[in-house]
Image (cartoon, rainbow, N blue to C red):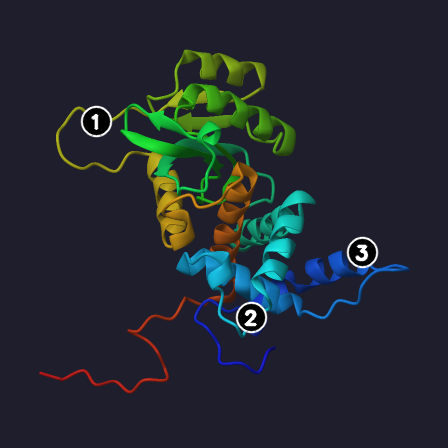
Amino acid sequence: MSSRRAYRSDLSDARWALIEPTLTAWRAARRGPGTVARVHDLREIVNAILYVCRTGIAWEYLPHDFPPYKTVYDYYAKWETDGTAETVHDLLRDRVRVASGRSTTPTAAILDSQSMKTSCNVRESDQGIDANKKIKGRKRHIATDVLGLLLTVVVTAASVQDSTAGKEILDRLAAVHPSVSMAWVDGGYNDSVRRHGVRRGVRVEVVKRFAATGFHVLPRRWVVERTFGWLMQHRRLVRDYETLPQRSRVMVLWAMTNKMSLYLTGESTQTWRNDPGKPDTTVQK
C-alpha cells in the first residue's frame, strides 16, 4: 500500500485482496522478452480509477500522488478492451450471490434503462434524444438479477428505444447467462421483446403500474431502480463523460465493483459524518 495519505475511495486491504489475484495474473501473463518493466502499483491504478468513478473528476485532474493520469487511463482502456474489468466485476458478483445464499448462475433478470446527458466531448453520432424524458445524450440499458447485481449493460444513444435495446440485452443474457429463463420489464418494452424472449428461451413479463395515484413500490421493478440509485452514488455516472460508449459501459462495471467489494468486506464509504480523524463535536441536548 502506498505511504500517501489515503482517500475515501481507496481500497482497503480486505477489498484489494478480493481482486488482487486476478490483476496480478493479468500482469504476469503480459510479461515476456522485450516488455517494459512495470513500475506502477496495480492497487494504486485501481484506486485512481475508483477516485475518478466516485468523485466524477476529469482524468487529467487526478491528484499528483496517483500515477500519471495517462498511465491510469491506459490501464483503464486495456482492462476494458481485454475484458479484465468485466472479469473482476463478474468474480465479485458471483461471490456476493454465494454470500447471499444463492447459486452463481441466476435464473431471473429485471430489465430497465436510464437516460443521461452527455458532456461536450461525446460525438454527435453517439448521442440522441429521448423523446419521453426530453434528454439529449445516451442511455444505459441494464439487466440485473433479483438482488440488483448487474448481469449485463449496453450503452446506446438516448434515441434508441427500450424495445430495440431490450432484444440486444436478451441476446447477451442468452449468451452469457443461459440459465436465465424469466425477465421482468416495464411498459416501455413492447410485444416484440416478449416474442424475442420466447425465441431465446426467456419468458418476458411486464410489471404494470398501479392505477392509484401517488408513489407505489412496484414488485420486482424496485430492484433495478435501486441499482440505478447505487450507480448514481458515483458522480462520474451522473452525466456520461466518456468519449466512447464502451468506456462508458466499463465505468458502470467499476461502479458496481466498488459497491460489491464494500458489501463483501462489510465496509461502507466514509463520509464527513463518520470520519474517525475528526472529533465528535455534536452538542448533546
Secondary structure beneath label 2: loop
- Contact, mark 3 vs mark 1 (Cβ under 8 Å): no
Say which label, 2 or 3, has the lower sequence index: 3
Mark 2 → mark 3, Cα distance in angstroms: 23 Å
Residue reaching furthest left? 285
Quadrant that contains the N terminus:
bottom right
The amino acid type found where label 1 is placed reads: Phe
Residue 223 lies, in percent from the top left, at: 38, 41
Where does the image place residue 5, in percent across and percent down from the top left?
49, 81
Tell me which numbered mark, 2 or 1, is placed earlier along the sequence. 2
Residue tagged 1: 210
Can residue 220 be seen here? The reply is no
Say which quarter of the image contains residue 272.
bottom left
Kindly identify which residue carries mark 3.
30
Spatial CA distance of label 2 from label 1 is: 50 Å
**Is residue 88 positioned above or below 219 on the image?**
below
User: Could you tell whether 190 is left or right of 172 in the image?
Assistant: left
For image coordinates 45% across by 42% down, the residue present is 121
Q: Name which quarter of the figure residue 250 lies in.
A: top right
